Image: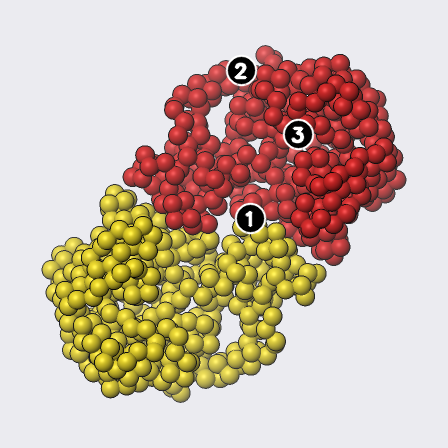
Chain colours: A red, B yellow
Amino acid sequence: MSDFILIHKEKNCSARLGKLITPRGQIDTPVFMPVGTQATVKALTVRDLDECGAQIILSNAYHLLLRPGPEIIKNAGGLHSFMGWKKPILTDSGGYQVFSLSLLRKVTDDGVAFQSHIDGQKHFLTPESVIEFQTLLGSDIIMPLDECVHYPCTEDHARIAANRTAAWAIRSKLSFNQLAASNNNRKLFGIVQGATFEHLRKESSNRIVDIGFDGYAIGGLSVGEPKDLLYNITQLTTQFLPEDKPRYLMGVGLPEDIIESVILGIDMFDCVAPTRYGRNGTAFTSTGKITVRNSIYAKDLKPLDEECNCYCCVNFSRSYLRHLFNTEEMLGPRLVSLHNVYFYQQLMRQIHKAITEDNLIEFKKKFFEKYFSEEIY
Amino acid sequence: MSDFILIHKEKNCSARLGKLITPRGQIDTPVFMPVGTQATVKALTVRDLDECGAQIILSNAYHLLLRPGPEIIKNAGGLHSFMGWKKPILTDSGGYQVFSLSLLRKVTDDGVAFQSHIDGQKHFLTPESVIEFQTLLGSDIIMPLDECVHYPCTEDHARIAANRTAAWAIRSKLSFNQLAASNNNRKLFGIVQGATFEHLRKESSNRIVDIGFDGYAIGGLSVGEPKDLLYNITQLTTQFLPEDKPRYLMGVGLPEDIIESVILGIDMFDCVAPTRYGRNGTAFTSTGKITVRNSIYAKDLKPLDEECNCYCCVNFSRSYLRHLFNTEEMLGPRLVSLHNVYFYQQLMRQIHKAITEDNLIEFKKKFFEKYFSEEIY
């Protein structure tokens, strides 16, 4: 039996309900994974995450490699016990961060050399070392090393990166299989690259699918391209991915992006938006984004979102939250981050319900009408 | 019947167990009040405080007057509903902050003029306006405006300040009584001043007690004086205070100060130490203070305190906490603040038990042996 079970296919679009079975429990898809870059979803405890209904979180191999480093996580018995999170964890390979954060990087077919953005220390990542590190972390879903390109980039550059990603994917799978005895049903996903070039996306999809993985990620999007290009490439790529495996759109996105992409057949998402916006005092609500510092909220006794049942909305007013941000109290970022993560999880629950009822297109229409109805402060 | 009930007097020292009845519930004394300067105990939610066992918190009228200001708190229906805390709140008068934080202050017998340390705006506080503001806040225990002096200060200066404090105390009580109809059993405490001069302390105590208050605070200590002077003046002053009213040692203190002062007959404490130390990564534990950033904790899988049952100690290791501080993750200050507030509440529970068993002197000995046994990192 497959570890990904399709429960229901929406009648009016490509959305699906599924169950992904991992070493640490089942995940109901479509799923949004809050991002715990440095072994913590910023400002939140694992109890907060549980209470929001998070089923799985993402953590970043690049950051964990630099701090605290493999020895300290190994000493703790892996990432789960280090950070106290008992449910599944997906770790990315660090590829994206190497290409966006690190200094003096040099890519060869063998791997990528770079200097830490923190202390300048030299590191060398290979497809194999990346699999080994994520195995040490105890990840439930492992992502292979890939080469990411910026937007925009030339076709030549995109082709070279996609080819290298495919070659690395083969080595990653070999390495993963060699470690399989200790793998305990953990998953290895493949990553499709190809930037915004349709034929490269098709070619990359076919090569990655031919190698064969437990799930397929669409990488290299949400890097600054226009929205229509994000949706078009997602739609295009999805049709080359097998129906019976989970599809993961990396780094996406805002609530509207998630709804659109679920409609296109995407099952998994991650994004820093809920916590990053939360730290800056912007809340996602059913009536759109609101910036709690705004003076119009000075005496507003309503919760951030009148439809929300999170700890923040049940207990605190916009007036109080504005005061917390004005006085730079840590409780402000904490409460708005909590609300935003809850809002995302609640959105996924609403999406599940709509798919079950073959009603997702209508849900999207109603959600957007309300979400984009008010002026955004 | 009095609103302060003495439950038990320790046989071997001056410690007492009591119950203080306030508009929002009974408080078991001796009690430690976590400090919520700006309508939030820094980094903690009211749920965290509940779970630590906090019975009452302190908030600062000076800070609340400046931000968010009376209008916004009044609009929320008072401080309790503004910040979501349902148990008692004691508010200080702002006197201490006016004398330690504000700019260009000018004290006259009428009151004190000062400029906000935030935006330079001019304010004028009188004993009456301070009572009115705390009534607006909905405080359960109100502190009158007093004049604080620095340590060291001249005897002349200390005498003038103590005299003015006594004169203001009379006006405060009159003002409080005029507002009594809306007071709903809230308390007004008197504040003894006199710096470190014994005869001034005696004189101030007698004058304040003669006016008659619901409880008596010892102000002007914990301002930089040596420990023996803190204890001596506390002991001296306490003997001039009536036995049947609660005694509050303002701004004290570290765990050792609290134990020593309970032995001298003090019933109430407040201090920023648990949250301020927590934000900086210093934890109070049964074996002394530890600085979690220290490299000796890099692979230490023990909790902060092996005897502690707080959320932090049950779930997270020193190794993980050190990582959080090293990577400047907000969860670090949050978890160590939570632990420290819990540690203080747990200390008070231990003190209660020891008083009940007439065993406080022995408890102190054992606590100190352990607390001061290890080298402090």
For mark 2, what is the residue?
A: A361
- Distance CA(mark 2)–CA(mark 1): 35 Å
Q: Which mark is residue A45?
A: 1
Query: Does residue B362 appear in the picture of this structure?
Result: yes
- Placement of A375 over or under B310, stated as above or below: above
The quarter of the displayed image where residue B135 is located = bottom left
- Distance CA(mark 3)–CA(mark 2): 23 Å
Question: What kind of element bears circle 1?
Answer: loop
Of mark 3 and mark 2, the one earlier in the sequence is: 3
Mark 3 vs mark 2: give the one in front.
Answer: 3
Of mark 2 and mark 1, the one earlier in the sequence is: 1
Chain designation of label 2? A
Mark 2–mark 1 contact, CB under 8 Å? no
Q: Amino acid at mark 3?
A: Met
- Placement of A266 over or under B327, stated as above or below: above
- Distance CA(mark 1)–CA(mark 3): 24 Å
